[in-house]
Amino acid sequence: MSKMVALPQTEDSAKPSSVSFREAFLFWLKLGFISFGGPAGQISIMHQELVENRRWISEQRFLHALNFCMVLPGPEAQQLATYIGWLMHKTWGGIIAGLLFILPSLLILIALGWIYIAWGDIAVVAGFFFGN
């Protein structure tokens, strides 16, 4: 027979703090601009910031959300951001987190594409895009 042992409560297992919509918006915008390293890097940044640094979500809740998103088809980092946004601020939180997770990258790609189309025949610009 196995016996369950309750672990003592520590500061880490304390209830996460309440987060304003503005704070969450700014975090998701920042994450959209700095996220790199593919899904593993993005998930790592979310864990570091949301669980360890800001304590907006508990470790257990984050891992539960990550496991749930890993089962679903599609990009798990995007789904995790959307789900955590929904957990914090319901429908609008999920929409904002999901959009801001991808929107900055989209805008950067559009800007780079426009620069290439407009000035791609200039040697310095072509060298930048071709890594020369």
Image: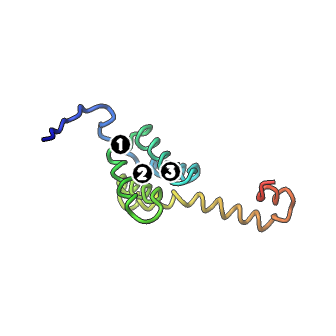
Residue 84 placement (x, y as % from top left): 39, 53
Mark 1 vs mark 3, CA separation in Å: 17 Å
Q: Quadrant of residue 5?
A: top left
The single residue placed furthest to the front in the displayed view is 1
Distance, label 2 to label 1, CA atoms, is 21 Å
Q: Check disc 1 and give the amino acid type.
A: Glu
Q: Amino acid at mark 3?
A: Ala
Task: Characterize the local packing of mark 1: few (<14), some (14-19) or many (20 or more) Cα atoms within 10 angstroms.
Answer: some
Quadrant into which the C terminus falls: bottom right
Q: Which residue lies under the disc numbered 3? A: 40
Position of 25 relative to 13 (above/below):
below
- Taking the spot 54% from the left edge, 49% from the top edge, the residue there is 30
Q: What coloring was used for the rendering?
A: rainbow
Q: Where residue 109 sits in the image (x, y, percent)?
A: 65, 62
Residue 41, position as x, y percentages in the image: 52, 48
Mark 2 and mark 1 lie on one chain; the one further toward the N terminus is: 2
Residue 113 higher or lower than 30, as above or below: below
Viewer-closest of 45 and 55:
45
What is the number of the mark on residue 59? 1
Give the mark toward the camera: 2 or 1. Answer: 1
Residue furthest toward the bottom?
117
Q: Earlier in the sequence, mark 1 or mark 3?
A: 3
Say which of 107 and 120 sits in front: 120
- Identify the amino acid type marked 2: Phe
* Residue shown at the point (37%, 61%) measured from the top left: 71
